């Protein structure tokens, strides 16, 4: 059975030239959808004295991105104003950020988070690394397109203006989306060659030939790299992650580690990131919001499974313990249930 599920997990359905990976969403299109009714209910909720946040949360967190777009269209028709602008005026804080995030398409949301991580003085490297290193080829292509449309600028230009050295080279190599498509043929020679190059460019020599690491990790397909990291252990006394920690430091180290973690198990990477964000008394709201908003229609169901498996506690319970108020209600609704 495990073999079958592994096969299904790697199966990509080709549709119009784009491979559609199987999705594991917690937010799905609602049945008997009536955008005009939703828009009218939101307008009433916004106009209510003190704002009826619960109704707004109930509607926006239980509709797909496509449906939210239709609600926004109807809202503008009946209220004669933009829904995002109206929400901005009615809400505040973490709840406002979450619901405004839901009003964007997934690619627009990622693009705006990327832009925000590079805006003004200083760069928010943590966000930049997460967004560039955890997104797959298709997602990155969509983000680049959205970035261009929203900000009239190429994302590469902003990244190269905001970062430097090998860190910049790695991020730029990733956003070029030159990664190979997964192949049905396993090329054992190439797996061995790549494993040896990674070893000889790092642990085996004095200093690190970072360029070789970047080209292999930004261009090879993910199933191929998973086999390369396995093979790598027969050359190196350390596994790939240990080698990265020994060879590079700072943002470059964090980026390579994020890549390897996502190649190995992307949903576990997000689960661990959520756990880290809610380890202390409060919660790193920006991180929690970003992951739930960006992954609720992609793989949040799988992230929940990994969270429970790894941390022996459900994501739902963890959110309930570390957040409060209407923001908590919105997160729990996106989370979609307890495990």
Image (tube, rainbow, N blue to C red):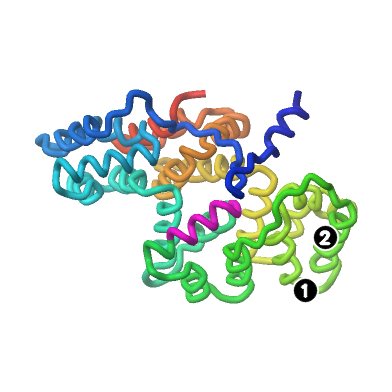
| Mark 1, secondary structure of its residue | loop
Using the rendered view, name the quadrant where residue 256 is placed: bottom right
Residue at (80, 48) in percent of width and height? 227
Q: Residue furthest left?
A: 49
Residue at (50, 34) in percent of width and height? 25
Horizontal and vertical percent for residue 294?
46, 45
The number of callouts visible is 2
Q: Which residue is mark 2?
A: 194
Tell me how far mark 2 sits from mark 1, CA to CA.
Answer: 18 Å
Crowding at mark 2 (Cα within 10 Å: few <14, some 14-19, many 20+):
many
- Which of the image's four quarters has the N terminus? top right
Frontmost residue, 26 versus 53: 26
The numbered mark at residue 207 is 1
Q: Is residue 100 rendered to the left or right of residue 192?
A: left
Residue at (38, 28) in percent of width and height? 30
Relative to 33, does residue 170 appear above or below in the rendering? below
Q: Is residue 133 rendered to the left or right of residue 236?
A: left
Using the rendered view, name the quadrant where residue 257 is placed: bottom right
Horizontal and vertical percent for residue 310?
62, 34
Magenta residues, start to end: 136-146
Frontmost residue, 149 versus 155: 149
Residue 125 is at least partly visible in this image: yes
Residue 321 is at least partly visible in this image: no
Give whichever of discs 2 and 1 has the lower sequence position: 2
């Amino acid at each position: 059975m495990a073999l079958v599920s592994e096969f299904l997990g790697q199966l990509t359905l080709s549709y119009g030239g784009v491979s559609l990976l199987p999705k594991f969403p917690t937010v799905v299109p609602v049945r008997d959808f009536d955008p005009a009714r939703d828009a009218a209910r939101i307008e009433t909720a916004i106009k209510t004295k003190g704002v009826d946040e619960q109704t707004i949360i109930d509607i926006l967190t239980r509709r797909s991105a496509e449906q939210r777009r239709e609600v926004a269209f109807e809202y503008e028709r009946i209220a004669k104003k933009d829904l995002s602008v109206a929400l901005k005026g009615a809400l505040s804080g973490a709840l406002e950020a979450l619901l405004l995030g839901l009003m964007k398409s997934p690619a627009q949301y990622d693009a705006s988070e990327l832009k925000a991580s590079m805006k003004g003085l200083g760069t928010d490297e943590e966000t930049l690394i997460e967004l560039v290193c955890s997104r797959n080829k298709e997602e990155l292509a969509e983000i680049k397109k959205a970035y261009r449309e929203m900000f009239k600028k190429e994302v590469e230009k902003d990244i190269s203006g905001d970062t430097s050295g090998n860190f910049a080279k790695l991020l730029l190599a990733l956003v070029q989306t030159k990664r190979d498509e997964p192949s049905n043929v396993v090329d054992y020679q190439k797996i061995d060659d790549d494993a040896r190059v990674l070893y000889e460019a790092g642990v085996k020599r004095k200093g690190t030939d970072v360029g070789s690491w970047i080209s292999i990790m930004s261009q090879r397909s993910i199933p191929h790299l998973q086999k390369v990291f396995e093979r790598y252990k027969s050359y190196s006394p350390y596994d790939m992650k240990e080698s990265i920690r020994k060879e590079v430091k700072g943002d470059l180290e964090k980026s390579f580690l994020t890549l390897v973690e996502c190649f190995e198990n992307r949903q576990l990477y997000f689960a661990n990131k959520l756990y880290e964000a809610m380890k202390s008394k409060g919660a790193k709201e920006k991180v929690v919001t970003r992951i739930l908003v960006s992954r609720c229609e992609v793989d949040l169901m799988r992230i929940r499974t990994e969270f429970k498996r790894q941390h022996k506690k459900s994501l739902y319970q963890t959110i309930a313990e570390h957040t409060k108020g209407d923001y908590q209600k919105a997160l729990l609704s996106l989370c979609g249930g307890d495990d």
